[in-house]
Amino acid sequence: MTNNKHLIAVDLDGTLLSDDKKVSQRNKAALQEAMKQGHEVVIATGRPFRASYMYYQEVGMTTPIVNFNGAFVHHPQNDNWGTFHEPLSLDVVKDVIQVSEKYQIHNILAEVMDDVYFHFHDEKLLDIFGFGNPRMETGDLKQILKKDPTSVLIHASEDEVEKIRKYLSEVHAEVIDHRRWAAPWHVIEIVRSGINKAVGLKKVADYYNIPTSNIIAFGDEDNDFEMIEFAGVGVAMGNAIPQLKERANVITKTNEENGIAHFLEKNLL
């Protein structure tokens, strides 16, 4: 069995979760059957831990979890496993905030693990980020931010997003990586350079001694690029962006059609 043990990595939004943010019975059954057969199932998400733990529990996982696109990896059930936290440098972040204020931004948020700091008060975003009851504070980030943040989000108007990204690439390419959120959000997400889901996934695979060829990864967005390329079998959801489908080995059905279960039932179980 050992040489046939697989690590199954699932993204949450647009992948494991339906559009109304639920895990379908069929997806849950397929993942639980995989675990019963001795495979490991791991979540790899851009979400913070507090906003992904309920799905971890619902599926009944027993693995480490990859949050913030790889910037934070830990084992919810085993404190001895170690905690990997790769935050951004506070100096760089303050720099970025200062420059961003010259553009038409709606807001800037910094997340330090499970604390969320808002540059401006923002009812719409409070709703999204209030998930899991983090500690939230609002005020000038250059003043209130005292620790290196795990990730920074800039919410701007659509035409400003590209200008800000151009600046980030030209000035801070060495130290940060940035991505764009899926529509309808015009959000730039910034993490430390060299951090992505594949980095987190490799830590988990090494821990279980599972070779890359036995990793199956499911995703739908540009923050899944590295993970899909790293996995032995990279599976793009039917609803994935075209660039991810090009990188994937296989394209399955959409997140609304139980794409994960569809692939696993056919190929692994």
Image (tube, rainbow, N blue to C red):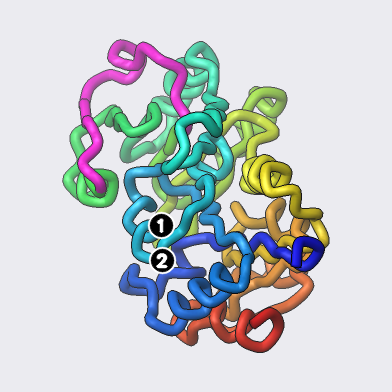
Q: Is residue 152 left or right of residue 42?
A: left
Q: Is residue 78 magenta?
A: no
Where does residue 222 sit, x and y in percent of width and height? 62, 56
Query: Under tag 1, what secondary structure?
Result: helix
**Marks 2 and 1, how far apart in space?**
6 Å
Report the residue that reaches farthest toward the front: 1
- Is 226 situated left or right of 58 in this image? right
Q: Which residue is mark 2?
A: 59
| Residue 238 image position (x, y, % from top left) | 59, 80
Task: Tell me the number on the disc at residue 56.
Answer: 1
Relative image position of residue 268 (x, y in whole percent): 69, 79
- Residue 204's place in the image compared with 31, above or below, is above
What is the quadrant of residue 113 in the picture?
top left
Judged left or right of residue 133, residue 207 is right
Whether 5 is drawn above or below 199: the answer is: below
Going 29% across and 28% down the picture, which residue do you hit?
117
Quadrant of the image for the C terminus?
bottom right
Instruction: Work out whether residue 243 can be spotted.
Output: no
In the displayed structure, would residue 65 be above or below residue 116?
A: below
Q: Which residues are magenta?
A: 132-151
In the shown orientation, is residue 135 left or right of residue 241? left
Residue at image point 53% right, 23% down: 88
For the N terminus, the image quarter is: bottom right
Three-letter residue code for mark 1: Tyr
Q: Nearer the viewer, residue 212 or 269?
A: 269
Q: Disc 2 marks which amino acid?
A: Val
- Contact? badges 2 and 1 (CB < 8 Å): yes
Residue 162 spot, x, y in % from top left:
56, 45
> At 52% across and 72% down in the image, what residue appears?
31
- Name above or below for residue 204 compared with residue 80: below
Front residue (pair 6, 98): 6
| Res 163 visible | yes
